[in-house]
Amino acid sequence: PKNPLRTTDPGALEMLKIAHDSNVETVFDRVVAQQPQCQFGYKGVCCRICIAGPCRVKADDGPASKGICGATAYTIVSRNLVRLIAGGAASHSEHARHVLHTVHELVEGNAPDYQIKSPAKLHKLAEKLGIATLDRSDIDILRDVAELGYADFGRYQERPLAFLDSFLTEGRRRKFKHTNIMPRAIDGTVTEMLAQTAMGVDADPVNIIFGGLKTSLADLAGEYIGTTLSDVLFGTPEPIVSESNLGVINPKMVNIAMHGHNPVLSEMVVAAARKMTAEAKQVGAEGINVVGICCTGNELLMRQGVYLATSSASQEMAIMTGALDAMVVDIQCIYPAVQTVAECFHTKIITTEAIMKIPSAQHLAFSAETAAEDARKLVNIAIEAYKHRDPKKISIPNERHKLVAGFSIEALTDIMAKVNPDRPMSVLTDAILSGQLKGVALMAGCNNLKRPQDEGHVTVLKELVKNDVFVIATGCSAGAYAKFGLMSPLAVDAYAGPGLKSFLKTLEEANPQLTTGLPLVFHVGSCVDNSRGADLAFAMANELGVDVPRVPFVASAPEAMHEKAVAIGTWCVTLGLPTHVGSMPPVEGSDLVYGITTQIAHDVFGGNFIFEMDPAVGAAKMIDALEYRAWKLRV
Ligand code: BF8
Ligand code: SF4
């Protein structure tokens, strides 16, 4: 079965025609082949936690309304839900652990290819963590930061997770203590979640969900460690101009796609590629073009201006261009199918991490100790593959758009400081109090082919900006805007409402040093960089003198897919944010769990999920929430 309408991305649509004509199977075929999907699983009432199962809730009452052990729908649904959060927290923190390990190796003198690119970020982080900085070398400071990071993974004493505790608002700190969900360590919390939800342990859905909230905070801590230490190692992003969509793949160059998540690998490959033009010329190419896919693409875009080729659902399409010589992957969101598609072309798929291999793909174990050399080897594989290109198979969509990215919260603050040097954040909050802006929205998350790719992201964004919402974006949501040309100053005139337009104009006029206009939507990074979104919400709360639940700030994942997205959405709610999700998580099998996530969460934490599959309606609900909060601040 073929269904070309499962994407709206113009670049992907063009490639999809070719996939159909040449009979290459892609995700767009497989998603159709999976229909209809199992409704027990969809609603969360399938339990596979022990091997007496699988058990399904098949009736409203009687023995068939429970699992074999007697677990009822609310127990089964809540257990399944929090295990998704644990998976997300494990993923983000695995990423963070790798960055932390690289920092540790650097401190120990075993990672000669890495350095402290942002001492300013290091000092700021150390001060927040209560680590002395006066008269100390950067390496000494970093050693203490790394030790505290390791402690945050494995602490057994009853003390809060240091990285998390260091950046919360006072109000959230109290709330998490009071509700007993402040984690003390990342690894321990994830393990506890698995133990709590094992067969025959917790059956109380409320207790299970509170365990899930605690796990989501461990996830936030992992993200925050990932973001801050990546900034220390690779630099805090600053506004940068680049381009996006499959048209950035250059037929005359050796093209290497960096796909996955961790800048620890991708930064090294970019650095190596920049030094290897001569080698590329030897095989007849004009040079080396590194492009990004998914979140490692976002990381490279933010710090290096590397072109963003595409986002998650269209990852196979990059190979279909016939001009991709290698796809280097690390972890997360990499379809195993990339290898199958690559076998129809000359493209080499190379895995690099011990926990991530794909049958038939090449594996090159990447290590911090030999990073530059490993990166050279990876680039060489691409150069070698270039020789085997089949010109008849090359077909690159003529689709590429200019964009401006690189808006760390530091960069945003600097821009606002030009308007008000003493209280930069008041520039944003005053604009909301005066009604010029309705509030701030964090757009995040994946593609989920339960709906056409990117349609949700684009629809929600257009509604928000038309209504004067200041929008920041991460992950594949940011990827969607980049690919569609919506992350460009040119899009402001076309889509922004009058308040947002005048707000951006004020910022631009105060910042003549910027070589580019400001974009319609501000790229704050990869998925771990959702911690930057939390940082902004905290800064706004502190500026307004209230806690997060009163800040006109909402979050949305219109096409959430990964367990990581479930973890992120959950901490957004726990921080006190109305959080829209446009792809239904498996909670409909229990009215109680549905009610906790959409209503009771609001009573306790001030945030709640808004499950709304119609993106325009979802956006309207987000705008309502912003307007209500802004009105409450004014009265
Ligand atoms: O961490 S947004 S599909 S690429 S999970 Fe994955 Fe989702 Fe994309 Fe990045 Ni995030
Ligand atoms: Fe069935 Fe209970 Fe085992 Fe789940 S834990 S599979 S409901 S017996």
Image: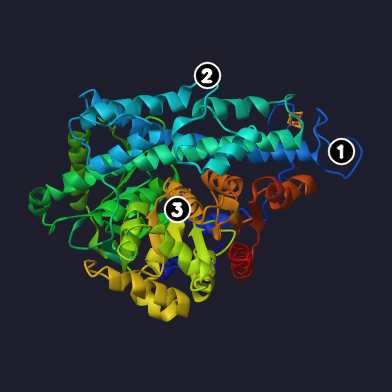
Secondary element at image label 1: helix
The tag earlier along the polypeptide, 2 or 1, is 1
- The image shows residue 458 at horizontal and vertical percentages of 49, 68
Q: Quadrant of residue 513?
A: bottom left
Where 514 sits versus 130, above or below? below
Q: Which residue is mark 1?
A: 64
Please name the residue shown 45% across and 49% down the image: 530
Q: CA distance from mark 3 to mark 1?
A: 48 Å
| Furthest residue toward top | 157
Tell me if I can see residue 616 in this picture: yes
Q: Position of residue 354 (x, y in %)?
A: 37, 30
User: Callout 2, which amino acid?
Assistant: Gln
Callout 2–callout 1 Cβ contact below 8 Å: no
Q: Position of residue 378 (x, y in %)?
A: 23, 41
Image quadrant holding the C terminus, namely bottom right
Q: Nearer the viewer, residue 53 or 295?
A: 295
Q: Is residue 619 left or right of residue 461?
A: right
Residue highlighted by disc 3: 536
Does 529 sit left or right of 275 as displayed? Answer: right
x%, y% of residue 413?
35, 57
**Count of numbered circles in the view:** 3
Label 2 – label 1 distance at C-alpha: 44 Å
Q: What is the C-alpha distance between the residues marked 3 and 2?
A: 30 Å
Is 2 rendered above or below residue 587? below
| Residue sitting nearer the eye, 69 or 362 | 69
Q: Which residue is mark 2?
A: 157
What element does badge 2 sit on?
loop
